[in-house]
Structure formats: structure tokens, C-alpha cells
Image: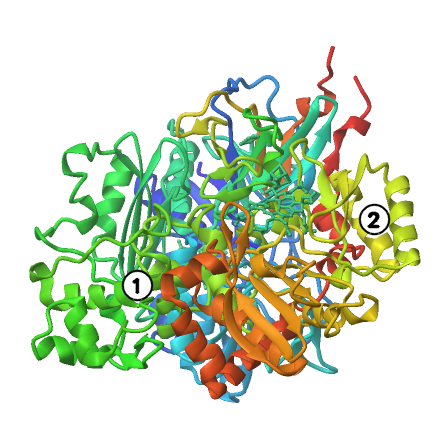
Amino acid sequence: MSSTIESTTRPATAAAGKGDMGRWIDIAALDDIPPRGARVIRTRLGCIAIFRTHDDRVFALDDRCPHKGGALSDGLVHGHAVTCPLHAWVISLEDGRVQGGGEGRVGTHMVRVAAGRILIDASLATRNAA
Amino acid sequence: MSRKLVIIGAGMASGRLLEHLVDAAPGAFDITLFGAEPRGNYNRIMLSPVLAGDKSYDEIVTHDAAWYRAHGITTRFGEPVVKIDRRARRVITAAGPTGYDALVIATGSAAFFIPVPGNDLPGVVGFRDMDDVETMLQAARRGGEAVVIGGGLLGLEAAAALRAQGMEVTVVHLMGHLMERQLDEAAGYLLRKELESRGITVLCDAHTRAILGHDRAEAVALEDGRVIGADLVVMAAGIRPETRLAVDAGLHVERGIVVDDAMHTSDPHIFALGECVEHDSVVYGLVAPLYDMAAVLAKTLTGHEARFRPPAISTRLKVTGVELFSAGDFATGEGREDIVFRDPARGIYKRLVLRDDRIIGIVMYGDTADASWFFDKLTCGEDIAPIRDTLIFGPAFQPGQEPASATAALPGTAEICGCNGVAKGSILAAIRAGATSLAEVKARTGASASCGGCAGLVEQILADTLGADFEAPQVQPVCACTDLGHDDIRRLIRAQKLKSIPAVMQEAGWKTSCGCHLCRPALNYYLLCEWPLEYRDDAQSRLVNERNHANIQRDGTFSVMPRMWGGMTTPAQLRAIADAAEKYDVPAVKVTGGQRIDLLGVKRDDLPAIWADLNAAGMVSGHAYSKGLRTVKTCVGTDFCRFGTQDSTGLGIRLEKILWGSWTPHKVKLAVSGCPRNCAEATCKDVGIVCVDSGYEVGVAGAAGMDLKKTEPLARVATEDEAVDLTVAFIQLYRENARYLERPYRWVERIGMDWVRARVVEDEAERAALIERFELSQSVYRKDPWAEQARPEYGPRKWQPLADLTLEAAE
Ligand code: SRM
Ligand SMILES: Cc1cc2nc3c(=O)[nH]c(=O)nc-3n(C[C@H](O)[C@H](O)[C@H](O)COP(=O)(O)OP(=O)(O)OC[C@H]3O[C@@H](n4cnc5c(N)ncnc54)[C@H](O)[C@@H]3O)c2cc1C
Ligand code: SF4
Ligand code: FES
């Protein structure tokens, strides 16, 4: 695989402050997720869905639909959006917003791909209900 | 006194740096240039034309001996640096040490050899320098077979060149489409089509397992078992920054040697540039940014301020006759808009990605004449709002220019009407002879006179030929991604032999880059139905139930329903179900309306394990989640019932064993009753058989869901075999002709029972052909998806979480 391209997806909500950045955890290879697919990671505050799109971009969103809590990781991925498996709401992977008028917004997280590996923001590992 | 400057690597980046230095500060440095290759700087990107025989090595040399002499540069070619001694500020080669005041590392990259057995055999080469090209040219002179591993820019240039040199070439690519880093699926499809037309074999989704051979490479083995003969294997699966010297010297190295905006490494006396560096977490693999680095480093070395800023990067493929361009960020997404232009007839695809009225991404295939015009707008961030409507047509926009329709691309021999065998040429002839409407074409040629499925295409041909004189009635499109209806798409898949989702989207002029949740499942079904052997089912184009082989519940758990053939079970099976229910804490066990048992509320993580347990007890998936065969309900029939006339249970089980696993446009349910009392409720099923004294009454197209409808009689036959044949033929006709998500009763309502009877009952040859096509498809699909997905290797690929961070130590 070419090692020359990488993409970083920074969610619109997270301030791109330098301080906490740079601490990334390597969780898996890009190829562990099929293109146009998703897998989950477990954290103490619930599951996070990691999506891989047709153009090999990677996004991380809370694995809960704002409608009735459907697991977005089981949805159908198209473009940079996912269709919820329960009642077909379409959620943007870029900013977690519901497309076409639904209420609510899904939390997004920092993730990036480097050298074919998926890296997530280290604070996801340490976050706690406290 | 001039400073001693040592440069490691005589490549494209250092070549550019030297030019800047001798221009800006002649004589300021005493320069020594080390190169591992036994030659000076040359234009590496032109190695592809050299390999193809279009250019010679002499034509691509950028700096010759006279140039180095004229500028007083000491050259030490063929002499690799083996060590940097930072404390003494000197570099070491086989000939000894050389001191420096300032050191520049410009060692570029090395080809990445994928770690498989046999990757070090003679005959396996990278594609990086002139020596590699000479090895390949020698192999090409002997002819034979070449396998190129990697379908990116380098791999495809190598493949095209080796093909031009007369070799049999196969490209083995790990990903689903070619050049996935630079192209979207649509452009990747067109590129593949072009390469295949040159005789290059392209295998996507192909994992290399090993390179086979004794003294040298003889073949490449893939994970799926295929073995491809190879006299030459080209590794073009990526590049790795050449950082070994820097690592040994203790410089800060991540993926590349880390540099700041001015090209300093972590040592104040050492600088680096080119593919070996990493700047702001990015490593580059194309020359444009490296040239910018050279300009910056020249300033830094001569004491001026300069900062490297990552430029927009564009890619072209240097294969004669292939027009392809890609730049910027061409991903889709919220706040981004796509302008897509497809001209199926001329094989053209252009896509601009806009954000805030600015071009941020470009993909072009087939016609790249306007590429630099678009790229210019991308780099300077021009507001394109005033010209948005005509932007995609480029600077030479002619009003009225429109893409050609999908039917315009079809050859005259393409069959438009499957029922009556009418080709496009005959329809054109009828139009030339004066037909101006669908009705007239139908009357003259018979096209669309039977099932009417091709009416949309006939109208499109009328519109292509008559232009503004013909007003086509609107068909209901599949979804917002296309203007074409389901029937048109199915006819195009057949007529143009389209065998992949990107192929359909290109040739039918899709308006989006990769479809949506409405069209993808439909296209996936149409393709697997039409090309059961060639098309590979795409799990990512299926909705959750069919992807997970279980029904999702409102709380995210799943229901699991094993098959009970014809509603029959055994104490052992019931025991196994009971054990599974207890073992996996299943909250509810229910007898369904389909004569079997449902385990409701199974946790997603438990699915593979519960399936494995049920498999072990001899049970398979009941497909209660599929657009496919669901159940065959039966009554007890002659075995026990005093009224039974035939073996209804046996026939039901036989039918279920033939039909299970098949995919259909919508779900299909059957029932067989042993007598007209009809205890299995056969008269409201998709196919319902009622046994009578003289044989079997086969009815079809019943409904008892959202609509209620009695089955229509298809035929009355004397033997069980005939009843089975009619059933299979009817279901295959439904598979081949209905629209996705159209139940049989709706489809029959639209096309009429006469049309169905003519094919399934009256035309014996057609019936046999339908059965044969069904069997062909079942040779692939009559298998248990649970057994497959419960295999251990599926766990880490699909069922287990990617990572479990709840186990990380809390801080
Ligand atoms: C389990 C079962 C109900 C029961 O407890 O008995 C059932 C459960 C569901 N049915 Fe059904 N249907 C069940 C028998 C029926 C029957 C009766 C029959 O099969 O004899 C019908 C009427 C006949 C028919 O098929 O039309 C039936 C007509 C429907 C329909 C309406 C279809 C139509 O075209 O009119 C839907 C909706 C759909 O498919 O779009 C539906 C959909 C559903 C879904 C899949 C709803 C959904 O999308 O989640 C239910 C899944 C529940 C779950 O979470 O597991 N179910 N459903 C039955 C399973 C039968 C089996 O063993 O496979
Ligand atoms: C076939 C081919 C086609 C390409 N096509 C394109 C294209 O169309 N467009 C594009 O933009 N880019 C293209 N590229 C990429 C482009 O050539 C590279 O980006 C560019 O050459 C990198 O420049 P560089 O100076 O960093 O490294 P290089 O040009 O690789 O130079 C590095 C040099 O350092 C030498 N070296 C390494 N280690 C040592 C050592 N220890 N001691 C001494 N010397 C050493 C190497 O032998 C090599 O000669 C192509 C590359 C190839 C191989
Ligand atoms: S009738 Fe409705 S509620 Fe009951 S199982 Fe069928 S779909 Fe679900
Ligand atoms: S829970 Fe996602 S659409 Fe209803």
C-alpha cells in the first residue's frame, strides 16, 4: 500500500488546540474495516463506530442514532453518510448531523489514518463517567 | 571561505536544490554529492516512458558530467553513504569519511516489498530506478508473463509499458478498484475497462499469498487459490521513505525524517528534503511538493527566511492514450456539492467537488483538456458561483452541450426487448421509417409488446433520435441518484453486460459518485441475479439484516430463526434450540406464523456462537431476514391425515431444499396443502400448491400481508416433478423480471398472468431454460451463510470490536 497519502479528519466540534493533540492510539489497520463499512470500538462511555468510506476516509462517531438509538455501525455507508439500520435516518459522517431535517446530532471524535493504520484520540481511552 | 555542504542522494529533489543553490549563491558552498546509483541526477518520473520504449535513458538525464564540472560540484556516484557521524560531523562511505559543515539528506524512498514468501526470489523487482527498468526490459525481451502487484500509479504505468513491450500482463490489486488513492470508483472502472481492452488482466480485491518458484519467480499465488504464471513480478505496492541513515544517527524520525517548515531536522547542522521527509505528519510521493521543498531549503541554507507550505497536488497517469487527472479532495460529504458529468457513449467522467462555491476536488477521465483550467481555480480558491451552472463544461462551453444518454452508447446489436428479441438497430430502423411514438415502435417491431419492461429504453432511443420532437413520459426513477427506472437499469445490465456497481453507475449516468441506501441494494441484487458466477455479492451494499444474517430488533439485538424444513422438526432439534436459548440468555422463544421457532433478543456478539451451536445440531439459517426464500409451510398430508391426497409435507420439504438460499427481488413464501381444506393456507402465498386426487394445483401471486389476495391458477399437473418444475421456473422468471422490492403479486398484476403462463407453462423450452438458470445461480447461493460467518476468521474481521478500550488502565 502506498505510504504517501494520509488523511486526518478533525470533527468540526473539537477545537484544534495543540495541547492534547499528538497523543494518538493505534487501534487497527485500515484494512480491518471493509470499504463502505464500519466496526466498533468499546469505551467506558459506550461504543464508538469507526467508519471507512469508499474513498478510504475514516470517521469516528458515537454508535447511537439520535432517533431511537440504532447502532450506526450496522448501517449502510454511502458517500460520507450512513443510513441508520432501524428507520433509515441518514447521518453525515463529517459532523454527525441528521440529513434532511431530523432532530439531534451524533457525537464525533478525532481519528486519523497514517501509514495504513487507524489512530484515535488518546483521550477516548481514558474518558470516564466521572 | 566556502562552507562544506554534503548531499546524500542524487535524486529529483536534490537536483532541484542544486539548481537553486548555484543560481542564488554561486561559490558559497563547496558541494559534494553522494549517490548510491552509479549515475547522476535524472528525471525519475520518466522511467515509465523509458520502460515503454518511448524514450531512452539519455533523454531523461537532467544533469550531466559537464554541468557538475561547470559548477564545481564533486560527484561521488555509485558510492552509498553508510553512516552519519553527527559528533564529528562527517559521513562515512566505503572509501572513508567526508566532513561537512552542513548536511542534506535526500535519500528518497525505496519500493515496498510486501512481506510474502518468495518476495526475494530473482525475477521479483521494484520499480524505482534505472537498474529496475533495465532488469524489466531484459525480462520483456524474453517475452512471457508479468505480474504487477499493486494497481496504483506506478503499477499501472509498469503494466501498460510491459504490455507495450509484448508481455502478457496481470495486475493484482488489493483494493476494490484501481488507483483508489487518486480515483473514485467511477473513474477506476473506466480505467480498468481501458486497460483490459489492451489485453491487460486486472484482478481487484486480490490478496497475494506467496511468490512461487525454485531458483527464480515462476508464479504468484493468491489467497483465493488462484495461481498466475509469472516470469517477472513487479512490486508496486507502495513506497517506504528511505530513513535508515537518519534512524541510525538518532535523528527524530516518524514515518519520514521529521523536518520543520524551513527543512531543519532535529540536528541543527542537518537538513532533509524529498520523499524521505515527513512534514506536519505528511509524507509526499509526487515531485511538485518536493520542488517547493528544494526552493525553501535553498533559502534556508543561504540564510534567508522561507517556509514550506503543502501545495495542492494533482496526478496524471503517464500511459499513452489514457486521459486521467485527479487533484485535491474528492470525497463527498456534508457541505460539499458534487457536479458530475458522465458521457457513457464517449467514456467520459468528470467530477468536481465544491465547498462554499470553491472547487476543492477534481476527478476526470476520458477528457482532461480542461484539467489545468479547473486546477487553477482549485489552487487559487476562485469563487465559481457566477459560472456554476456551466462550470463542468469548461472554458470552451457551448450552450446546449449535454451528455449523451445511456442508450446512445449501445451498439445496434444490443438487445433492447428481451421478450421479443428486438435489437436497438431494428428500433432505429422503425424510427427512420417514420415511427414517432412508443406505440408505433411497438406495432412495427414488437419491442415492449410483451412485459413492457423495456418501454423506458425504447422511449430513450426515440428521444436520442428525434430530439426535441419526442417528449418522453416520465418513469419513476430508482432513487435520486438516477433518472432511470428499475426496468431500464435491468435491461442495460443485460444489454451492455455490466458486471459491477461502478460499471452500472457509469454507463447509466448516475448522478452521485457511489449511490445511496436505495439504489445500492437494488443494483447488488440485479447484478448477482444476472451474473451469478461473475459478480461477487457486495455485503456493504446490503442493509443490516442481510449483512448480519439475522433480524435486527428495536433494541439492537437480533432474532435467530433456524430452518425447519416444511415445518417438520425432531426432539433432538428442539433440544438443541432449548439449549441454545438457555446458554445465550435468549429472552423470548416464539413459534412463528411461518411454522418454525424464533429466538428473539440475541446479542450481536453471540450470533456466531449460537449459529455454530445450531449448525452442530444440523440446522441452518432460516433466512427470516432476507429478500429471498423464507418458508415453505406444509400440512401433515397423506402421512397422517385421513383426507390427504398427496405427500404435501414431502413436496414442501423438497421445494424448500431446492429453493433455500436464493435471493429474490422481495421475500418469497410458499405453502403446500394436502387437500382443498387447505390447512397450510396455500391459496394466499407467493406460490401455493393444493394437492388433489388427480395431482397438483399450482397457484401463484397470492398475498396475505398488507394486501389480501387469492392465488391465481398457474396450471394443474399430474406429477410432483411437474409441480416442482413450474414452481422453480416461476420463481426464476420473477427473479429476472420483477423490480427490487416488488412482491410477486404486484409484479404479476403489472405484467399479467398470460405473459407468465406463456413462459412458464406453454413454452417448454423456456421453462427448461429458466430452471437451468436457477440451478446455475443456486450452485453459488445454495449454502448456509451462518456456517460461513461463524468460521473463526470472521470473528476478528466482522463480529468482534476493533478495540476494547474499557480494558485500558484508568489514569
Ligand atoms: C416472526 C414473524 C411474526 C411471528 O412471530 O410469527 C414475522 C415478523 C416480522 N415480519 Fe412478518 N413475520 C412473520 C410472518 C409473516 C406472515 C405470515 C406468514 O409468513 O405466513 C406475513 C403475511 C404473509 C406475507 O408475507 O405477506 C407477514 C407479513 C409481513 C410484511 C408484509 C409484507 C407484504 O408484502 O405485505 C412485512 C413488511 C415487509 O416485508 O416489508 C413483515 C415484516 C416482518 C418483520 C421482519 C418486520 C421488520 O422488518 O423488522 C418482523 C420481524 C420481527 C423480528 O424482529 O424478528 N411481515 N409476516 C413471522 C415469521 C415467519 C417465519 O417463520 O419466517
Ligand atoms: C516510475 C516512476 C514514475 C513516477 N511518476 C511520477 C509522476 O508522474 N509524477 C510525480 O509527481 N511523481 C512521480 N514519481 C515520483 C517521483 O519520481 C519522486 O517523488 C521523486 O523522484 C522523489 O525525489 P527524491 O529526490 O526525494 O528521491 P529520489 O528521486 O528517489 O532520489 C533519491 C536518491 O537517493 C539515493 N540514495 C538513497 N540512499 C542513499 C545513500 N545511503 N547514499 C547515497 N544515495 C542514496 C537513491 O539511490 C536515489 O537515487 C514517479 C516515480 C517513479 C519511480
Ligand atoms: S405484524 Fe407487525 S409488529 Fe407483528 S411481527 Fe409483523 S411487522 Fe412486527
Ligand atoms: S433509530 Fe436510527 S432511524 Fe430510528
The residue singled out by tag 2 in the image is B609
Q: How many marks?
A: 2
Tell me if residue B726 can be seen.
yes
Q: In the image shown, does B382 or B808 lie closer to the viewer?
A: B808
The secondary structure type at the circle numbered 2 is helix
Q: Nearer the viewer, residue B596 or B197?
A: B596
Local SS, label 1? loop
N-terminal of the pair, mark 2 or mark 1, is 1
**Horizontal relation, residue B809 to residue A38: left or right:** right
Label 1 Cα crowd, 10 Å radius (few <14 / some 14-19 / many 20+) = some
Asked if residue B25 is positioned above or below residue B230 in the image, the reply reads: above
Whether residue B589 sits left or right of residue A40 in the image: it is right
Mark 2, other Cα within 10 Å: few <14 / some 14–19 / many ≥20? some
Give the letter of the chain under mark 1. Answer: B
Residue B57 in view here: no
Classify residue B83 as left or right of residue B731: right
Q: Residue B440 in the image: state x and y as whole percent.
A: 15, 72
Q: In front: B83, or B756?
A: B756
Give percent across and percent down for residue B369. 21, 57
Residue B448 x, y percent position in the rendering: 28, 71
Q: Which mark is residue B323?
A: 1
Depth check: give the residue in front, B27 or B401.
B401
| Chain hosting mark 2 | B
Can you tell which of label 2 and label 1 is closer to the viewer? 2
Type of amino acid at the residue the image marks with label 1: Glu
Going 52% across and 62% down the picture, which residue do you hit?
B711
Instruction: Give how far across and how far down residue A63 sits, in percent.
Output: 62, 30
Q: Mark 2 to mark 1: distance in Å?
A: 51 Å
